Amino acid sequence: MSGGMNDTPRSDRFTIGIFGVTNAGKSSLINALTGQQLALTSPVAGTTTDPVKKSMELLPIGPVLLIDTAGLGDTGELGSARMEKTYEEMRRCDLAVVVIPVDQGIGTEERKLIERLKKAVIPSVVAVNFCDDGVPDERVQELFAEAGLPVCYVSAKTGMGIEELKKTIADNAEYDGPDLGLIKGLVGPGETAVLVVPVDKAAPKGRLILPQQQTIRDLLDHKAMAVIAQPETLESVLENMKTPPKIVITDSQAFSEVAKRVPAEIPMTSFSILFARQKGDLRYLREGASMIRKLKAGDKVLVLEGCTHHRQEDDIGTVKIPRLIRKVAGQDIQFEWYRGNSLPDHFEEYALIVHCGACMLNRREMQYRLRTAAEQDVPVTNYGMAIAEVLGILPRAMEPFGNLSKGC
C-alpha cells in the first residue's frame, strides 16, 4: 500500500506518465503493469477525467509514481481543461508511455503528443495495446515504427508483452540530471550536521515537515549523524559538542537568529538552499537573489509554491517574503501567487520569480520552470536565498557550495 509515513516521497520517485486517446486502455495497462487493480476501468469513454497518481514499486526501477492521465482528444470546454491537465503532467514525467490501440494506428493526437515529448526531451516508449491475438504482422509493425520510439506490443487482457514493456521502460529510464542527494559533498560518513528545526504553527504536532524529514534520511543514507536543535537551544547544543559539526542547516525563517549564534568558522546554510542545489541551478538562483535590491517601484514579483499547504497567520510565501522584499526594495513592489501545479501563461510581466524550496516537486518539473523563466529572460531565486539576501548573509549561506556560490 502507498501513502504511509515510510514511503519514498513522490518528489523522489521516478515518474512515469501514461498517455493516450480516450479508451486506449491506459488504466487497464497500469493494472497489468502493477499486477494490482490500481486504476478504475470501464468501456465508457472518459472514465479517467483527471490525472490519477499512484505511488508504488515497479521492478527493476524501484519506487515510481505512475500517472494515469485523461484521454487525448477530449472535446468541449471541460474536455479542453482535462487536456490541459494532461499536458501539465507531462512536465514532471521522467518517462512517458504512449498507449495506442493496435486497430487504430498512430493518429493525429498521438503524433502531436509524440512531437511534444521529443521537444521536451522526455524518454518515451510506445505500448501498442489490445494485441489479444498476439503480435501483429510486419505490415502493422511498420506503421507503428514510424513513431521513432521503442515499441512494445501488449495485451492488458492476456498479459502478453507486459514483462517486455517493463524491461523497455527500465532500459529507457533516465533521470534528469545527476543524483546529488541533499548533503552529498557537505557531510561525510561519521560526520555530524546540526539541523535547526523551529517548532511553530507551520510544523504539525508530532511531525517534522518534509524538507527536514528528507534531510535526516539523506544524512542516514550517507552514514552521517544528525543533531536536532531549536533556535533557542542552538548555542547550548554547539557548546556541548566535543567536535564542531561539519555544517549547520537551518529553516530559512530562522536564518537571522541562527547566523548570530553559529561561529563564523562553522559552515551554515538552509534546507531551502539544499533543495535548490538538488533540483535547480544554484548559479542561476543566486543571480536571481541579487536582483531583489534592483527592483523598482511598480515591479511585479511572482511567488511560486509547489504545494497548497494551509496558510498560517504569518505565512512565509504570502506574508514574510513580501514583507522582507519590500523592506529593501520599497513598498510599491507588487506580488502575485501561483500554487501547486498551476503556472501563469507567461513570465515576461514579472521582474523576479521567488520559488519555494520545491520539496514537493521533482527535479524535471523544477528544471522546466527554470528553463521557461530563462527563455523569457526572467530571473528566479528561492525562499532561502531571498531571505538570506535581504538579511545580508547570502554569501555565508552559499559558502558550503564552493564555486557554485558565485554567479557566472
Image: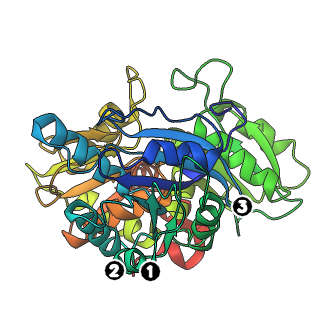
Which one is in front in this view, the residue at disc 2 or the one at disc 3?
Answer: 2
Residue at left 43%, top 55%?
A: 385
Q: Dot 3: within a 10 Å radius of its alpha carbon, few (fewer than 14), some, or many (20 or more) residues?
A: few
The quarter of the picture where the C terminus appears is bottom left
> Which mark, by number, is residue 146?
2
Mark 2: amino acid: Glu
Residue at left 34%, top 60%?
A: 103
Percent position of residue 104, x then y:
30, 60
Q: In this view, does 294 lie above or below 85?
A: below
Percent position of residue 142, x then y:
38, 81
Residues under labels 1 and 3: Cα distance? Answer: 30 Å
**Residue at image mark 1:** 138
Mark 3: amino acid: Pro
Q: In this view, does 279 lie to the left or right of 324?
A: right
Q: Is mark 1 on a helix, strand or loop?
A: helix
Q: In this view, does 325 lie above or below 366?
A: above
Q: Is mark 3 on a helix, strand or loop?
A: loop
> Which mark, by number, is residue 292?
none
Percent position of residue 292, x then y:
27, 57
Q: Is mark 2 on a helix, strand or loop?
A: loop
